[in-house]
Structures are given as C-alpha cells and as structure tokens.
Amino acid sequence: MTATPVLTAPLVVEFPFTRSLGPVQSAFLTGLRETTVLGVRTGDGKVLVPPVEYDPVTADELRDLVEVGATGTVTTWAWNPDPRRGQPLATPFAWVLVRLDGADTALLHALDAPGPDAVRTGMRVRIRWAAQRTGAITDIACFEPHAGEPHAPAAARPHSGVFPDPVTGIVAPARLDYTYAPGRAQSAHLTALAERRIVGERCPRCRKVYVPPRGACPTCGVATSEQVEVGPRGTVTTFCVVNIKATHTANLDIDVPYVYAHIALDGADLALHGRIGGIPYDQVRMGLRVEPVWRDGARHPDHYRPAGEPDADYDTYKELL
C-alpha cells in the first residue's frame, strides 16, 4: 500500500466575544477614552492597574477608584521581532509590563522602540494615546520611551469614575490562526473524500469501523491501520434544527432553518455529522436514509439528501445514537 502523504492546512477560528461591563471596568475603559488611567484600591491600600472588581486576596468587592499617572517604569520585557496580525504595532516592538506612577501592579502593553538594545528593565516610559479612542485597551496605542528626569512615583488620586456617556459593553474579536496537521489516519480519510470515497479504519480487537478514523480505537485504545470503505449511504440517527444563520463562514448561502444530523454510514460503527438538504426541515426524521451530495471541485460532501429508500428500522441504528 502506498503511504498517504500527511496533510496540513492553515485554519482560523474566529468569533466576536460580547460582554457587558460592571462599574469598575466601565469606568476604566471610559477613562481610557478620556485619556485618564484608573485603578482600584484594595483593602490593604494597594492600587491595582488594570482594576479588578474583586480583591484577589480577600475576594471583597472593590469600588474605590483612583487615578494614576500616564508615565511609569518597565518592570520586565520581551522583544517581539515579528508582529502578528492584530497586534498593537506593525513593526518590531517590545512587550512590556509597566508599573504606572501611583500603581502597585503592572500593565501589559507594547513599547515602541528601535530595537532590543533600547529597552531595559527600569526604563521610564509614557503612554502614547490613540488618535481615535472608543473606550478600549487599544485607546493606549502603545508606550514610548520617556526622557524625563527620574522621580519618585506620584501617589494615586481619588476619582469618582464618573464620565459622560460611559462605555457599558464591549465586543472583543477572538481569533486563533494555526496550522492543522490531521495525522496519518485522517489524511487518508480526507484524501479519499477528494476522490468521493468515504474511508474509515477497523479496530483489530473489537472489529468496529470508525469514521472519521482517529488512528486508534477509542474503545480499546489500540492502533488502527486497516482501511475500510463505508457508505456512501447512511441513516439519520438524530438531528437538530438550526435557526440562527451562520456568519463569517462558507455557509452564508444556507437559508435557515436547516437540519444538522448524526448520520450512521453503512458499514460504520460511529455516526458522523452532516447537513441534510433536498427535503423540508420539518420532514427530516430519525431513520431517514440519506446519500452524500458533492459540489464540483469540493473535497468533501456538501450535504446529504434523501436516498429514496424506506426508513431504517430503529433497531439497526439504536446503538449509534
């Protein structure tokens, strides 16, 4: 048997994270919009920047807001020679922890410096404010070296935390870029799909066929290597109706509601996921016999449609629910 090349592909997981803000975080982010940095004082007198809503030692609720300086001292740093998408600066910079004047903790952000030789622990820096501010941590564009005379940190000043038009919620985009390597077993499965075949692997001990294959039996824990072609037809074992339209995906053209189902392919001992098409959503049912539909040039089935066969008897798929 010819060895299947192991595949790799760049993948992106991305979604917007929406959260409401309590009084402390609301004041902090609104303050940044107004070029004011706020911290919070704990019961033992320490000033935390960024502020938190509960004391990390006693768990007491914290509301005593204070204003700290826009200058500070680098406590530690690391050079970033190759900035990535979405990072504060497009040119090489230093990640720094900065203890702002009046604070007892350090804030993580970027320092704009010409090179690592220009950065050192203990150096004085100041905030460079963004030209357009919206009430987010990015209102601090970065830190920059501050050539002022060294001085003792100024004391934090009490602040009411009240600003016009406070920020009450934020939407933070979360994104993970990575390279996925499916491994030998799934590479063989994906290669077969590109040929419009569905291949799994049989466990040498329990003889069950798993699709997609994992390279090892999830029940027995032994390695699998015997390839078995299954399907292409199968049985809907259970399903759900999707009523929320997908965004930021290749499925933008799918009208809701639609059905996503577990499908037990003929010859397989594990149900896989698939979308059901070619039938009204309210006519999909357990036991429905289906077959895959490929689009031209696609590497995997686009969806499954009714195969025109009588429904499967419940006893034939009940173990795969």
Image (tube, helix red, strand yellow):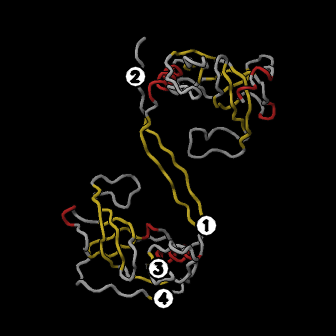
Q: CA distance from mark 3 to mark 4?
A: 9 Å
Report if residue 97 is visible in the image: yes
How far from the left and from the top, in percent, is residue 233?
A: 67, 18
Q: CA distance from mark 1 to mark 3?
A: 19 Å
Report if residue 298 is visible in the image: no
Q: Which mark is residue 5?
A: 2
The answer to which of 229 and 204 lies nearer the viewer is: 204
Q: Is residue 151 left or right of residue 180?
A: left
Q: Secondary structure at mark 1?
A: strand
How far from the left and from the top, in percent, is residue 92?
A: 28, 57
Which of pointers 1 and 3 lies earlier in the amino acid sequence? 1
Q: Secondary structure at mark 2?
A: loop
Q: Which residue is mark 3?
A: 38
Q: Which residue is mark 4?
A: 158
Cβ atoms under marks 1 and 3 closer than 8 Å: no
The answer to which of 93 and 302 lies nearer the viewer is: 93
Give the amino acid type for the residue marked by disc 3 in the picture: Leu
Cβ atoms under marks 3 and 2 closer than 8 Å: no
Q: CA distance from mark 2 to mark 1?
A: 47 Å
Residue 168 vs 150, above or below: the answer is above
Q: Secondary structure at mark 3?
A: strand
